[in-house]
Image: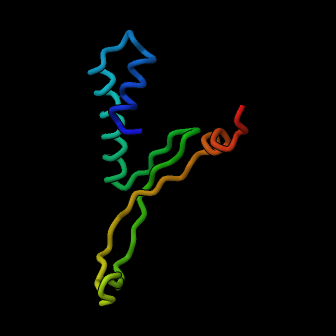
């Protein structure tokens, strides 16, 4: 599912809301999650999961095509850990 499909699904379930307002809400939520992670904060959505940032140290890697050593710079990467409710709903038996 892409963002526009999410917005459309919410709009279909809530015909009393304007499409532009739904799009603004979705964009605002995602922007706030990104801003918090950029500041190094952890974002937890109970029942869904937690977004956090992990730091990776600089290291020496290999170019897979040529096999030459390449320096990989240190970086921060996003990390998502699923919540208990999400895991349970994903693994629930199909009816």
Residue in front for this viewpoint, 81 or 1: 1
Pinpoint residue 32: horizontal percent, then vertical percent.
Answer: 33, 40
Residue in front for this viewpoint, 24 or 45: 24
Judge from the rendering whether residue 1 lies leftward or rightward of residue 93; answer left or right: left
Residue in front for this viewpoint, 52 or 66: 66
Rendered view: 54 above or below 80: below
Q: Locate residue 68: give its quadrant.
A: bottom left
Pinpoint residue 56: horizontal percent, then vertical percent.
Answer: 39, 71
Rendered view: 91 above or below 6: below
Q: Locate residue 25: give its quadrant.
A: top left
Q: Residue at x 68, y 44 (%)?
A: 91
Rendered view: 21 above or below 76: above
Pinpoint residue 43: horizontal percent, then vertical percent.
Answer: 45, 46
For this orientation, the residue located farthest to the bottom is 68
Judge from the rendering whether residue 48 lies leftward or rightward of residue 1; answer left or right: right
Q: Residue at x 46, y 50 (%)?
A: 51
Q: Residue at x 30, y 87 (%)?
A: 66
For this orientation, the residue located farthest to the top is 16
Q: Locate residue 23: give its quadrant.
A: top left
Q: How many marks?
A: 0
Viewport quadrant of the C terminus: top right
For this orientation, the residue located farthest to the front is 65
Q: Residue at x 42, y 63 (%)?
A: 54
Chosen colour scheme? rainbow
């Amino acid at each position: 599912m892409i963002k526009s499909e999410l917005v459309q699904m919410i709009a279909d379930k809530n015909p009393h809301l304007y499409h532009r307002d739904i799009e603004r809400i979705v964009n605002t939520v995602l922007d706030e999650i990104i801003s918090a992670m950029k500041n190094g904060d952890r974002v937890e959505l109970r029942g869904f999961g937690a977004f956090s940032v992990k730091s990776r140290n600089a290291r020496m890697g290999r170019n897979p095509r040529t096999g030459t050593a390449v320096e990989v710079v240190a970086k921060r990467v996003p990390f998502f850990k699923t919540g208990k409710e999400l895991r349970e709903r994903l693994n629930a038996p199909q009816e």
